[in-house]
Image (cartoon, grey):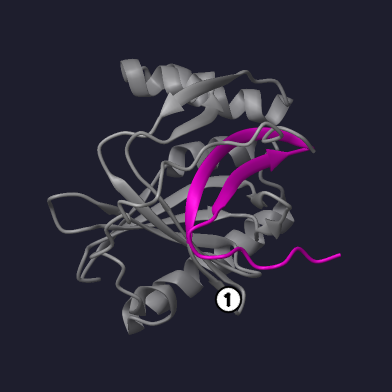
């Protein structure tokens, strides 16, 4: 049974899931959900769950711990830690069947585009499930340039079998697709959500009690 679209203003939980185990869970407000495109927003104060290695890295900058998180992901062993979203409002767009999602971090400076390569999303009763594939792309606000991020993590994931050959082929195709969209300012890059401001009537989205249920 296909889950129905989420109403604008409702809560949808974006989760990373590997082998039926939740790796991250973040509640978002739904901006739009139509024609296979799900647009979500998260802003400072939102409480989420993330791997303890990631939250430790955020607190300390310890890159060794960050890379340990990739090994833990491959082994299927990790602990989740509460984390409060800070500093920026995040507006995200997920398109059905795509191995990437597109985000904008909104702050006082021009909003950089951020592309996260991941498995195509799957709808659930509480939101959408996907799985981060470790590779990211930052694109200038005016689409004039870009830089790849976390290629070291992606290479590590390839070495230890976390990213298999079939998934690598999908990521390679998605990389080409994203760069073509950036060059043409099409698809998610034609939609400018940089002026988004959270409706003051909306309370912070909150994780439901069953956020870790599978």
Residue 206 appears left or right of 160: left
The image quarter containing residue 119 is: bottom right
The residue lying toward the viewer, choosing from 166 and 81, is 81
Q: Does the magenta-highlighted stretch encompass residue 5?
A: yes
Position in image of residue 81 (x %, y %): 53, 20
**x, y percent for residue 12:** 58, 51
Range drawn in magenta:
1-30
The residue closer to the viewer here, 142 or 4, is: 4
Identify whether 36 is placed above or below 50.
Answer: below
Q: Position of residue 67 (x, y in %)?
A: 49, 25
Q: For the stretch drawn in magenta, what is the main secondary structure?
A: strand
Q: Nearer the viewer, residue 135 or 81?
A: 81
Left or right placement of residue 60 versus residue 8 in this view: left
Residue that protrudes farthest toward the right in the picture: 1
Residue at the left extreme, as displayed:
108
Q: Is residue 160 visible?
A: no
Q: Label 1, on which residue?
A: 34
Nearest to the observer: residue 108 or residue 144? 108
Residue, x 44% and y 44% (percent of image)?
151
Q: Is residue 183 visible?
A: yes
Residue at horizontal 57%, vertical 69%? 173
* Residue 67 inside the magenta-drawn segment: no
Which quadrant would residue 203 be assigned to in this image?
top left
Q: Is residue 136 left or right of residue 184?
A: right
Residue name at image x 31 percent, y 48 percent? 89
Dot 1: element: strand
Label 1: how many residues lie within 10 Å, few (<14), some (14-19) or many (20+)? few
Reply above or below: 214 against 81.
below
Q: Position of residue 114 (x, y in %)?
A: 36, 56
Q: Quadrant of the C terminus?
A: top right
């Amino acid at each position: 049974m296909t889950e129905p679209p989420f109403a604008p203003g409702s809560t949808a939980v974006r989760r990373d899931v590997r082998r039926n185990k939740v790796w991250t869970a973040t509640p978002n407000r739904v901006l739009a959900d139509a024609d296979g495109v799900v647009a979500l927003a998260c802003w400072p104060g939102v409480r989420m769950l993330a791997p303890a290695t990631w939250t430790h890295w955020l607190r300390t900058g310890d890159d060794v711990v960050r890379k340990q998180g990739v090994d833990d992901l491959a082994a299927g062993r990790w602990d989740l830690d509460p984390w409060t979203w800070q500093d920026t409002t995040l507006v995200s767009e997920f398109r059905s069947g795509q191995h990437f999602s597109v985000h904008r971090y909104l702050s006082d400076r021009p909003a950089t585009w951020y592309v996260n390569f991941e498995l195509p999303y799957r709808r659930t009763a509480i939101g959408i499930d996907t799985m981060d594939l470790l590779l990211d792309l930052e694109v200038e606000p005016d689409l004039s340039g870009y830089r790849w991020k976390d290629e070291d993590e992606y290479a590590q994931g390839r070495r230890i079998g976390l990213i298999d050959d079939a998934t690598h082929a999908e990521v390679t195709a998605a990389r080409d697709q994203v760069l073509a969209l950036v060059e043409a300012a099409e698809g998610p890059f034609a939609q400018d959500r940089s002026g988004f401001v959270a409706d003051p009537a909306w309370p912070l989205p909150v994780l439901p009690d069953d956020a870790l249920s599978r």
